[in-house]
Image (tube, rainbow, N blue to C red):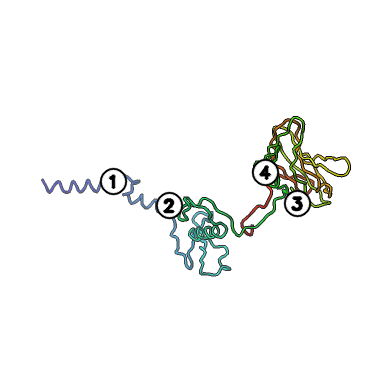
Amino acid sequence: MRKICVPIIAGLVAFSAFGVGENVPTSKSYIDSVLVDKQDTIERTSGNNQALTNTGTAGEYGTKGIYDSTGSYATQQDALVDAATMNAAVQNAINAEFVCISWVDDDPTKDCLLMEIRGATERRSPNLFDASRITNTSRITNNGDGSFTVTTPTNDSAAGTGKTLSEVVPELEIGKTYIFSLKSSPCRAQMLLYYYSDSEPSADILWDKRTKTITQADLDARLYFSQGVNKTCKIYDIQIEEGTIATPYQPYGNIYLPSEQ
């Protein structure tokens, strides 16, 4: 009986391996049919390390060299940069332009809280109005952000800065034309130039987008804010720039950019 069972079991195993169907992984015909879908063998590249590129044509591939820092730059200008080299280059660029000046708990080994630009290139703002030159008075409060809060009494519509135009804007030049800009809320405000001479004092209104060719009398005139009687108003985005076309507001001073930008 044992001799009879062995051939039967062997037959069942063989039948399960080759007789179940032609589309299973154990079928030789299945293996032969899918060989055509295999990717062609990629030949080993020679020379420097290279990356594979897509040519857009089925069955074809291309290669591109990876930059070798020990080689000549002239012969590798179109080479790819590996991630490690790129990361190092970015970090070197950051280190060359920025330096940390404040850390968590004042500990240089911890995260940086504040960085400053070194090797900076100076670019001048077109705005010549230096708000910091106007200090607080009984009617004017310098808010420290380039704006002013102005309060006028019931019997006066203006508030004097105590400064001449040349003291607030020393960069102004006689004979050149400038445009004046400002915003205010909730009332409509403007700047005034008061001229004091032997004759009757006079005033000139510097409203928003007013252009004016500067004279010596203008430089010597006292600068006022005017907004109507018994009002409290915020005056901001004050800008005086050379020319006849107003540009978007920029704070007074220098704009710093990283070197060679």
Residue 76's spot in the image, x, y percent? 55, 66
Provide the secondary structure element on which disc 4 rests: loop
Say which amino acid is labelled 2.
Answer: Asp
| Nearest to viewer (mark 4 / mark 2) | 4
Residue pointed to by mark 3? 170
Query: How dense is the environment of label 3, judged by Cα within 10 Å: few (below 14), some, or many (20 and up)?
Result: few
Q: How many angstroms separate mark 1 from mark 3 (CA)?
A: 100 Å
Q: Do the residues labelled 4 and 2 touch (CB within 8 Å)?
A: no
Relative height, residue 80 to residue 217 (above, below):
below
- Disc 2 versus disc 1: nearer the observer: 2
Give the residue at mark 1.
Answer: 19
CA separation, marks 4 and 3? 17 Å
Where on the picture, by quarter, is residue 138?
A: top right
Q: Tell me the number on the disc at residue 146.
A: 4
Q: What element carries label 2?
A: helix
Q: Which of 69 and 261 is in front in this view?
A: 261
Tag 2 residue: 37
Q: Residue at x 55, y 70 (%)?
A: 72
- Indicate whether 34 appears above or below 190: below
Mark 3 or mark 2, which is nearer to you? 3
Residue visible at 49% across and 58% down in the picture: 83
Q: Earlier in the sequence, mark 2 or mark 1?
A: 1
Q: What is the three-letter code of the residue carrying label 4?
A: Gly
Q: Position of residue 158 (x, y in %)?
A: 76, 36
N-term mark: 4 or 3: 4
| Amino acid type shown at disc 3 | Pro
- Work out which quarter of the rendered image holds the N terminus and state it: top left
Q: Are marks 2 and 1 in contact (CB under 8 Å)?
A: no
Sequence-first disc among 1 and 4: 1
Disc 1 crowd, CA 10 A, few/some/many (<14, 14-19, 20+): few
